[in-house]
Amino acid sequence: LDSDAAAKAKLQEQMRQEMEEEMARLRGRVRQDIEDKARAQDEMQRQMEAERAATQAQMAAQLEKEKARLQADRERLEAQRTEAKRRAEEKEAELKAAALRREQMKKEERERLRQRLADEAARKHAEAVEAAVQLQRIFRGYLA
């Protein structure tokens, strides 16, 4: 009876040990699964961070490109405005010069007309003086 009890106790001890070993193996597997899931989650997190960083870098590059385009547009418009202003000033100067030339031509024309009238008046005066001198001669001839 003792040998049956001893065999039973030995069998129970062996079963308990096997169960503990199985439990230890299961705990090891669970721990390994938890570590694998944590590594996978870390890897997924790292990939998401990398994708987010790449997206941010792409957006920043796009923003810089847009800023550069806007700056180029601004500079081009400023150059056009400056050129238009320069052309307007040039045109205004040409118009002023043309007006001055017209005014000068008018002055010269008035001076030529005045000179022609003065010459005409002097010629007529000379003719009148000549006529008066001839009339005097004629009267003197009659009176003499």
Image (cartoon, rainbow, N blue to C red):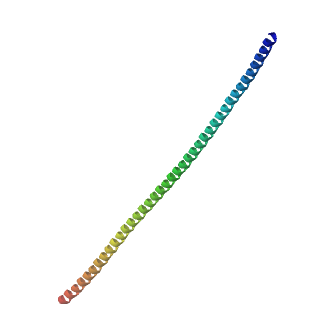
Q: Residue furthest right?
A: 3
Q: Indicate the position of residue 115 as horizontal and vertical percent values.
A: 33, 75
Q: Indicate the position of residue 133 as horizontal and vertical percent values.
A: 25, 84
In this picture, is 23 found above or below 144?
above
Left or right of 88 on screen, residue 60? right
Q: Residue furthest top?
A: 2
Compare residues 20 and 43 and report the one nearer the observer: 20
For the N terminus, which image quadrant?
top right
Q: Indicate the position of residue 10 as horizontal and vertical percent values.
A: 79, 16
Compare residues 83 and 29 and report the one nearer the observer: 29
In the figure, residue 137 lies in which quadrant?
bottom left
Total marks in image: 0
In the figure, residue 126 lies in which quadrant?
bottom left
For the point 77% across and 15% down, the residue is 8
Compare residues 60 and 72 and report the one nearer the observer: 60
Q: Residue furthest front?
A: 1
For the C terminus, which image quadrant?
bottom left
Left or right of 20 on screen, residue 97? left
In this picture, is 34 found above or below 66?
above
For the point 46% across and 55% down, the residue is 81
Left or right of 19 on screen, residue 76? left
Q: Indicate the position of residue 42 as horizontal and vertical percent values.
A: 65, 34
Left or right of 127 on screen, residue 51? right
